[in-house]
Image: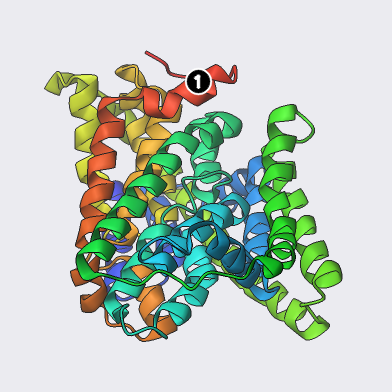
Amino acid sequence: MTMALWTLVGVVVAGMLLRMPIGFSMLVAGVAYLSVKGQDLGLVAEQVSNGLYNSYVLLAVPLFVFAANIMNAGTVSERIFDFCRILVGRMRGGLAQVDILVSVIFSGMSGSAIADAAGPGLVTIKQMLKKPEYSRGFAGAVVVASATLGPIIPPSIPMVIYALVSGASVGALFLGGVMPGVCMTLLMMVVVHYIARKRNMPREEPIPLKEWPAILFRGALPLSMPVVLLGGIYSGAFTPTEAAAVAALHALVLAAFVFRALNWRAFWGVVLESTRASAVITIILAGSFMLNYAFTSEGVPQAMAAWVDNLHLSRLQFLFMVNALFLILGCFLDVSVLLLVFVPMLLPAAKLLGVDLVHFGVLVVLNMMIGLIHPPFGMLLFVTKALTGIPIGEMMREGWLFLVMLLGLLVAITVFPEIVLWLPRTMGYGTPGAG
């Protein structure tokens, strides 16, 4: 490593230790790198501008954020909750099963784990805590685990960002997440059923048949969004980026004009929150473009590929090494940072070994979702604690079985890529990097 690269790494680490926002840490590190190299500091503005304004796919990120916030503010979560009670509420541990199904449906609208936990998750936790059979820790653990479905089931904000850095097809990535998402859903429901039978948890009271039509109608309208989005993408009516705009408009029309649950004050609050969240992501993106420029200039990705080649790793051994790396880093770093900084360094090695980029992308995103619920710094744990007051320790004691299940699924997807690739190939998507 050169002195300039050591300086860059040192400034990033120092910024994190000083609790400076990670995006600013990366930008300052980029300036420090250029200063030590004796290069024009105007390269910072050039790299950031080129990265942000030449990436059409990035428009999808703030639009999906806006759509998720609109739905959380517009009673969509409550409508979906009542709809799912009819479907699975009569199962033992019914409210926990309802939360998982709600997360599946909401995932098809937002693409964000945090939005899932803060919206539908909060609704179901409140319902579970009204019943003594559901402990605080169990309620929080179910919501935290099911929120990881958000970025796996399409659409997915992390997959959009991965497509930006890898060049993989967004449509193929979305399709690649479907079967893993289905597997996650079924496994979570099995875990809840096992715990519910063991603890003799109650079934929900049956909903009178005369109330079904109204509840189903209230829930059917939000359910139209995943149909419109995915149907539009795969029929060719619009691109995944345009689908984000359709999602935002669809959510706004439902919340403001159909449900009449969004007044001007609430709408302005949604705009402010979406702007803040998008700004945070944009600053991280800007910093990552500068870091990627430095790493590329220093030949770090090529050195990483050469190092992996010298280890004579098989494709499977490399993927397990990547799993271990991201499971550790996911405990400490934001998903955007992992996708924008570390994934580009690993892509040359993945291509060298013939790893399919769609398989690699879904695998990486699943790793990061596990990191969100893994101690000591799982972000979903902290978000849920902030919203509900449930101690993190209680959620971890009740949620270890979900964590084991997700790790088992991660191993299965690593060993059997067809779990990810079968649907994209069936739908006719060519997946780059197939070996």
Residue 271 found in image quarter: bottom right
Q: Position of residue 315 (x, y in %)?
A: 24, 21
Residue 3, placed above or below residue 88: above
Q: How many marks?
A: 1
Q: Residue furthest front?
A: 209
Q: How is the image coloured?
A: rainbow
Q: Quadrant of residue 298?
A: top left
Q: Quadrant of the N terminus?
A: top left
Relative side of 89 to 320, left or right: right
Placement of 37 over or under 302, stated as above or below: below
Percent coordinates x, y for residue 320 in the rendering: 20, 34
Q: Is 153 situated left or right of 378 in this image?
A: right
Q: Quadrant of residue 110?
A: bottom right
Q: Amino acid at mark 1?
A: Thr
Q: Position of residue 210 (x, y in %)?
A: 70, 68
Q: Is residue 407 above or below residue 283?
A: above
Please give left or right for residue 269 compared with residue 305 in the image: right
Q: Residue farthest to the top? A: 435
Viewer-nearest residue: 68 or 180: 180
Q: Residue at x 30, y 79 (%)?
A: 133
Q: Which residue is mark 1?
A: 431
Along the viewing direction, whichever of 418 and 83 lies nearer the viewer:
83
Residue displayed at 28% across by 65% down: 196
Q: Quadrant of the C terminus?
A: top left
Is residue 393 among what the camera can see?
yes
Q: Residue furthest right?
A: 257
Q: Is 397 displayed left or right of 150 in the figure? A: left
Say which of 338 and 316 sits in front.
Answer: 316
Residue 240 locus on image (x, y percent): 67, 39
Regarding mark 1 in the picture, which secondary structure is present there?
Answer: loop
As drawn, 354 above or below 419:
above
Instruction: Please name the residue shown 28% across and 48% down the image.
Output: 406
